[in-house]
Amino acid sequence: MRLRRAGDAALLIETGTPHRLHAAIRGLARPEIVEVVPGARTVLVTARPGTDLGRLGTLVGDLPLPETNEAGGEPLRVPVVYDGEDLDEVASLAGLCREEVVQRHAGGDYVVAYLGFSPGFGYLAGLDETLHVPRRDSPRTAVPAGSVAIAGPYGAIYPSRSPGGWRLLGRTTLTLWDPDRDPPSLLQPGTRVRFVAQAAVGEGDPDLARAR
């Protein structure tokens, strides 16, 4: 673990376990800590002006880490129609059929490791290793909001229409980002996520057109 000052009221912590460290700091609920932001290999801790950063760094450095970075409560269930443009390509890369890709993706237990790229875009840890496929060689200029995608070891849901190079498996109708909601992002670091396969409206059993 390496701690560095980030201005007069923040610490940037480099660590091999950023998501667990984030959960540990979040659990402190210290009044001098304003915000804790996890990244792929770092945790940024912002504090109130005047906070003794040396003392705060010692406190953070001595924290015992939890086994996981999961938040409490039931997982967020995300209904997905698996008709993504890259589903066949992912199946080929993984050496699976389409149905097996869907089963493995929907059968995973995910947790939001951190947010990035765009507002509300959560990097979901827990993707089946068989589905660890690379990003597209040529990113799309516009990926629709609600697109369910994978790239490398992570899963994700595009919260808004944006460019993107992740491989698209399907789509959901959930609104991931709403500036009028508090908080605006449906996903937060530590949020548990489960994907639920459903049929497109007008296809198959109508009961499957709703999240189970």
Image: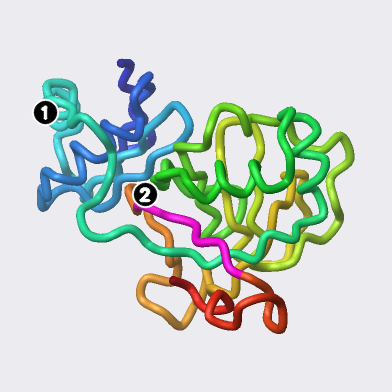
Amino acid type indicated by mark 1: Leu
Is 142 situated above or below 105? below
Nearest the viewer among 12 and 48 is 12
Residue 73 as seen in the image, left or right of residue 146? left
Nearest the viewer among 34 and 52 is 34
Which numbered disc flags the more N-terminal residue, 2 or 1? 1
Question: Residue at 61% of width from left, 78% of height from top?
Answer: 205
The answer to whether mark 2 and mark 1 are in CB contact below 8 A is no
Residue at the top extreme, as displayed? 1
Amino acid type indicated by mark 2: Pro
Question: Residue at 73% of width from left, 46% of height from top?
Answer: 98
Q: Which residue is mark 1?
A: 59
Q: Distance from label 2 to label 1 (Cα)? A: 21 Å
Residue at the right extreme, as displayed? 138
Q: Residues within 10 Å of mark 1 (few under 14, many from 20)?
A: few
Tell me where the magenta segment starts and ends, as one range: 192-198
Question: In which quadrant will I find the N terminus?
Answer: top left
Q: Residues within 10 Å of mark 2 (few under 14, many from 20)?
A: many
Instruction: Indicate which disc residue 189 carries.
Output: 2
Residue 4 as seen in the image, left or right of residue 52? right
Question: Residue at 72% of width from left, 44% of height from top?
Answer: 166
Q: Which image quadrant for residue 126?
A: top left
Question: Residue at 18% of width from left, 31% of height from top?
Answer: 66
Is 185 situated above or below 127? below
Tag 1, which secondary structure?
helix
